[in-house]
Image: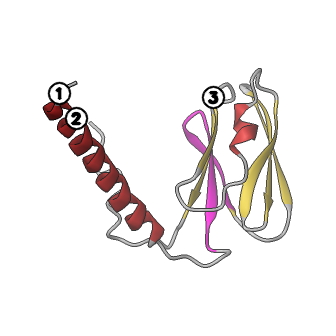
Amino acid sequence: MKRGDFMIIVLVLLLAGSIYGVKWMNTRGEHYAQGDLKAVITVNGKTYKTIALTKEEQTIEIKTKFGHNTLKVYDYGIQMTYSDAPLPIAMEMGFISRPKQQIICIPARLMVEVINPHKSVDDDEELDAVI
């Protein structure tokens, strides 16, 4: 490995690190109060239910032709507690409570995403168009 190769590797790593740092700083600045967040549950690409993330505990049973899943809302967040998928990886995704975090169960075609309904209008991370 020559000196020029080493310099290119270092420059690429610095560029990648700076891009990641800027994205981290932008998402860290999103402000919300506890109780403002909601979880959007989609099954097969269609909205199944939207739930407010509250301190009170509640259980959501989702039984579709794709599978059976159980979600538990508590402490201003949500977690998957049961999945009949062959490899229940979605249960390992844990407790989510911040905007843009997701739980995805591919065999059940289920996605749970935490959103901030009072987010800023200038959010650059949003999808602009689909072609």
Residue numbers of the magenta segment: 36-51
User: Residue 97, how many percent across, how many down?
Assistant: 65, 61
Q: Farthest bottom residue?
A: 33
Asked if the residue at tag 2 contacts the one at tag 3, i.e. Cβ–Cβ closer than 8 Å, the answer is: no
Residue 84 vs residue 13: left or right? right
Which quarter of the rendered picture does the C terminus lie within? top left
Number of numbered callouts drawn: 3
Out of 2 and 27, give the one closest to the viewer: 2
First in residue order: circle 3 vs circle 2: 2
Amino acid type at circle 1 is: Lys
Which quarter of the rendered picture does the N terminus lie within? top left
Label for residue 2?
Answer: 1
Query: Please, what secondary structure does the residue beneath circle 2 have?
Result: helix
User: Residue 60, how many percent across, how many down?
Assistant: 81, 50
Q: Residue beneath label 3, please? A: 106
Query: Please, what secondary structure does the residue beneath circle 1 have?
Result: loop
Which quadrant holds residue 121?
bottom left
Q: Residue beneath label 2, please? A: 6
Which quadrant holds residue 111?
top right
Amino acid type at circle 2 is: Phe
Location of residue 44 with respect to 17 vertically, above or below: above
Which quadrant holds residue 126?
bottom left
Location of residue 39 with respect to 48 vertically, above or below: below
Label 2 vs label 1: CA separation?
A: 7 Å
Out of 54 and 21, give the one closest to the viewer: 21
Query: Disc 3 vs disc 2: which is toward the camera?
Result: 2
Asked if the residue at tag 1 contacts the one at tag 2, i.e. Cβ–Cβ closer than 8 Å, the answer is: yes
Amino acid type at circle 3 is: Ile
Residue drawn at x 52%, y 68% as measured from the top left? 117
Packing grade of label 2 (10 A; few <14, some 14-19, many >=20) is few
